Amino acid sequence: MSYQLFEVFGIELEYMLVNSETFKVNPIVDKLLTKKNGTLTSDVSNGEIEWCNELVAHVVELKTNGPTADLDNLAEKFSENIKEMNLLLKEFKSELLPTAAHPLMNPEKETRLWQHNYSKIYALYNRIFDCRGHGWSNVQSMHINLPFFDDAEFEKLHAAVRLLLPIIPALSASSPIFDGKSTGFLDSRMEVYKTNQKEIPEMAGKIIPEQVFSRESYFEQIFEPINKAIKPHDTEHILDHHFLNSRGAIARFDRNAIEIRVIDLQECPKADVAIAVLIIESLKLLVSEQLIALEDQKKWREDDLLEIFNGVIKNAENCQILNSTYLDVFDLHGKTTAGEIWKKLYARVKNNISETHRESIEFLLENGSLSTRVLKAVGEDFSEENIQEVYQKLSVCLAQNRQFTS
């Protein structure tokens, strides 16, 4: 079934399983799914939320069980499922940990690929890219799926998504620490994401998608080069170009949706869904052409947008946006940060957002990204004990569905 623009949404959240005593990642998602379902399956339907496995055995995905129009009650539904998972995991001395990256994981030693359904696909990925790296086995994100009905709607949505993509990590950055050290990037997940498929650069492109605004041109300029590049590696023909496309936003013509992938996972569903709502309302504003005409949106080159994106993944909300033409879109001038653009956007769309989400968005805009708050809480003490203590507080936030204060 095809849906109109902004009629329904799909949200996906990825969580890592950690041992409650040692804080190490625990590759037992198969045990969790078996415990829930009675037998092992890669997807477990749990009412309005579905549980799924991922590439690595310590990451589980929660997603809307089909498209939904109800974003106001979604955080609570995710939270109920998280509580149920944590209850089931107690038997295995484990729990869910939020944020986009485990701050102490050693991917070289601790990566275990999923060994069950789709394992042939994962094994092939591993053979080509070697998935024992932060960019593969230590990344958790939220994906937002947005429908389009036809080429005309795809054109509007893709143009708007491309334009907004560079500043999304200013809201969502939550991965400031790898290997027990500050990486210098507030969104380390996106920094490693840029290069994790360097062996086949056609797959991720420049992260910001190309200037393609129809199904035909998307296949010609994005899917065909990917299929050509993967052919020598995929001798059994088991990979699908829809899955191989790893740009920051990907077109899924198999279900007529664009999936946004540059969003780090937060400390609780309340924060995740609030960010999704603000992104969706901002995209509606761009699609309406109140800020900038569609033809002008389409003129933005990926290189210019990538330059902004690179600054934002480093400094998140504090990134100074120096591109005056980009600032003009939001009617801003002079010294302006990515955080200030979001404040301006929020002021424009606030009346379309329910009270439920306003409080969470305002907290975020006032206190900064989760990365900023985590680094503030860690302070100068990057000892394993202190990092673990801070992240255990984040686990409590997840269990209680509340935002983290440093």
Image (cartoon, helix red, strand yellow):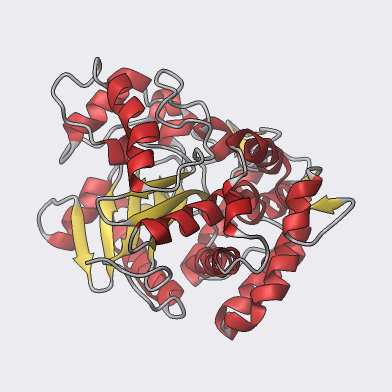
From the top left corner, tell me how far across and down residue 306 is, in percent.
63, 37
Give left or right: position of 252 versus 141. Answer: left
273 is higher (above) or lower (below) than 142: below
Q: Which corner quadrant holds the N terminus?
A: bottom left
Q: Quadrant of the C terminus?
A: bottom right
In this rendering, would 248 be left or right of 256?
Answer: right
The vertical placement of 237 against 64, above or below, is: above
Residue 280: tell me if it is visible. yes
Q: Most extreme residue toward the front, as rendered?
A: 295
Residue depicted at 74% across the width and 59% down the height: 341
Q: Position of residue 235 (x, y in %)?
A: 16, 18
Write down the quadrant of residue 26 in the picture: top left
Q: Is residue 56 visible?
A: no
In this rendering, position of residue 400 left or right of residue 168 = left
Q: Residue furthest top?
A: 232
Residue 249 in percent (x, y) is at 46, 46
The residue nearer to you, when weighing 239 against 325, is 325
Q: Residue at x 28, y 19 (%)?
A: 127
